[in-house]
């Protein structure tokens, strides 16, 4: 894009133009591999979420609705209209806290972009290459919007729900082949629907999958409307009454366009290794490093000091682990689990574990500290360090700069496949799981994505 043209387009239009110009052929082999890996990772989270109560409720509600069998509802294998397919698949993918994460923007792109793009792709009979390009476009646009929204946005607003609506609209608009004008309209309609606030977390309400599922659904709806000529604001992001001014005190519009078209920010997206809030992961890894993953007994431990950045405490310090969902956002619970078991698995966040006497005994001895030095590194790095004082007088220490799954400490393809097998176990047969993994990891060779979930 030349400078003269950029000056005549709004910020929103420039993002739309770049997304429109992105092609599969313009992606590197490394970038394509990364997108496929994230797609497979996302599918595992969708399957694993199907047994959770919120998804069962959503499935019951939509079971009474009717429509064209356009898109797959992955949790039960049925087909429905694309909007509902995007909603259910998105909601199911976020429940276990194992969805991917772009660290600096504090945004989970996969849980909103992939379900919207996939539902549209099945509806439109597109190829795997087109789907890969759409996912890349949605990730990139959503991450840039979330970065620009700033840290004050995160205090009250749930970025994956708010910024995710733009990201989902971009992924869907790319599938539909919208031109720059209609793509911009789609973003305009997405921005006016962006919603989701954090109060649910304090009360352990079921709102999170509603937030994220509606972001995917509303983004797709915005693209479908724009395709038919439904207009949206050209300055929905930067306008005087636009998204940034309405939801943030420290937004930086320039972050949307920084190195746009030259640098792909989605390459810095992490995959989550633990089934808990991303803010707990560096503390978990710091504990496992300090103890060499050796399980300890609560009676061995006098005190544990956890030093972490302030934003993690702002979100999680008041959360009490009285439900499995709250436990995923509780640093004391996650640290205690790592100490007592030498690991943290997604099965560890169960009602029974919440009543475990040793965990209940140990959690009050886990003291959280805001560390100014670590706070300065955030959000580029989410660092934690721990000090473990035993009753025998021994002191163990550990620090984690990059938890397992970060781009600097990535999961291997083998580990991603193992994660998928674990999350889909008991839901897919081993044969179906193997077929799906091979199809996803060879997605560029798929002519019609409708065949992804057909086993015969």
Image (cartoon, rainbow, N blue to C red):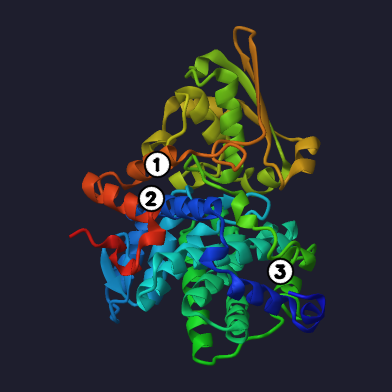
Measured Cα–Cα span from mark 3 to mark 2: 32 Å
The residue where tag 3 is placed is: 247
Q: Is residue 190 above or below residue 197?
A: below
Q: Is residue 10 above or below residue 53?
A: below
Counting other residues with Cα less than 10 Å from the Cα at mark 3, is it few (<14), some (14-19), or many (20 or more)? some
Kindly identify the residue that appears in the image at 58 percent across and 77 percent down.
Answer: 190
Q: Quadrant for residue 64, please give it.
A: bottom left
Q: Using residue 206 as the reference point, say whether residue 200 is left or right of it.
A: right
Q: Residue furthest left?
A: 456
The residue where tag 1 is placed is: 419
Counting other residues with Cα less than 10 Å from the Cα at mark 1, is it few (<14), some (14-19), or many (20 or more)? many
Q: Residue furthest bottom?
A: 229
> Could you say which is closer to the camera, residue 19 or residue 330?
19
The residue where tag 2 is placed is: 44
Q: Using residue 79 as the reference point, say whether residue 340 is left or right of it.
A: right
Checking the image for residue 85, the label placed there is none
> Could you say which is closer to the camera, residue 172 or residue 45?
172
User: Is residue 51 in view from this perspective?
Assistant: no
Marks 2/1 in contact by CB < 8 Å: the verdict is yes
Q: Tag 1, which secondary structure?
A: helix
Q: Residue furthest front?
A: 25
Counting other residues with Cα less than 10 Å from the Cα at mark 2, is it few (<14), some (14-19), or many (20 or more)? many
> Could you say which is closer to the camera, residue 451 or residue 343?
451
Q: Position of residue 276 (x, y in %)?
A: 51, 43
Kindly identify the residue that appears in the image at 56 percent across and 32 percent down.
Answer: 284
Q: Quadrant for residue 302, please give it.
A: top right
Q: Position of residue 347 (x, y in %)?
A: 38, 38
Q: Position of residue 274 (x, y in %)?
A: 49, 39
N-terminal label among 2 and 1 = 2
N-terminal label among 3 and 2 = 2
């Amino acid at each position: 894009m030349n400078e003269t043209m950029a000056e005549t387009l709004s910020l929103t239009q420039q993002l739309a133009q770049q997304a429109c110009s992105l092609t599969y052929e313009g992606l590197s082999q490394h970038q394509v591999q990364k997108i496929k890996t994230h797609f497979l990772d996302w599918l595992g989270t969708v399957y694993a979420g199907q047994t959770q109560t919120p998804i069962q409720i959503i499935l019951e509600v939509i079971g009474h609705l009717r429509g064209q069998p356009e898109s797959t509802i992955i949790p039960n294998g049925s087909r429905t209209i694309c909007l509902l397919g995007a909603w259910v698949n998105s909601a199911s993918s976020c429940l276990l806290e194992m969805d991917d994460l772009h660290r600096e923007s504090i945004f989970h792109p996969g849980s909103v972009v992939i379900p919207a793009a996939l539902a549209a792709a099945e509806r439109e009979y597109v190829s795997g290459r087109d789907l890969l390009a759409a996912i890349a476009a949605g990730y990139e646009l959503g991450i840039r919007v979330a970065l620009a929204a700033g840290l004050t946005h995160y205090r009250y607003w749930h970025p994956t729900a708010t910024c995710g609506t733009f990201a989902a609209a971009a992924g869907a608009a790319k599938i539909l082949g919208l031109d720059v004008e209609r793509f911009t309209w789609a973003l305009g309609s997405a921005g006016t629907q962006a919603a989701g606030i954090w109060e649910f977390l304090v009360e352990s309400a079921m709102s999170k999958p509603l937030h994220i599922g509606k972001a995917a659904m509303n983004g797709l709806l915005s693209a479908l409307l724009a395709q038919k000529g439904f207009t949206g604001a050209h300055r929905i992001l930067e306008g005087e009454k636009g998204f940034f001014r309405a939801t943030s005190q420290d937004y930086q519009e320039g972050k949307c366009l920084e190195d746009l078209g030259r640098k792909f920010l989605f390459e810095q997206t992490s995959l989550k290794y633990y089934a808990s809030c991303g803010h707990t992961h560096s503390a978990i890894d710091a504990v496992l490093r300090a103890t060499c993953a050796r399980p300890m007994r609560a009676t061995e431990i006098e005190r544990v000091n956890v030093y972490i950045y302030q934003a993690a405490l702002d979100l999680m310090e008041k959360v009490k682990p009285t439900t499995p969902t709250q436990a995923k956002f509780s640093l004391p619970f996650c640290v205690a689990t790592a100490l007592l078991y030498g690991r943290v698995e997604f099965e560890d966040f169960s009602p029974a574990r919440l009543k475990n006497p040793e965990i209940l005994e140990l959690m009050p001895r886990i003291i959280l500290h805001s560390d100014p030095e670590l706070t300065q590194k955030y959000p580029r790095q989410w660092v934690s360090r721990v000090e473990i004082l035993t009753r025998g007088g021994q002191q163990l220490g550990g620090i984690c700069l990059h938890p397992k799954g970060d781009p600097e400490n990535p999961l291997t393809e083998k580990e991603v496949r193992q994660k998928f097998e674990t999350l889909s176990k008991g839901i897919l047969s081993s044969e179906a799981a193997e077929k799906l993994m091979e199809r996803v990891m060879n997605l560029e060779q798929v002519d019609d994505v409708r065949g992804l979930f057909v086993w015969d």
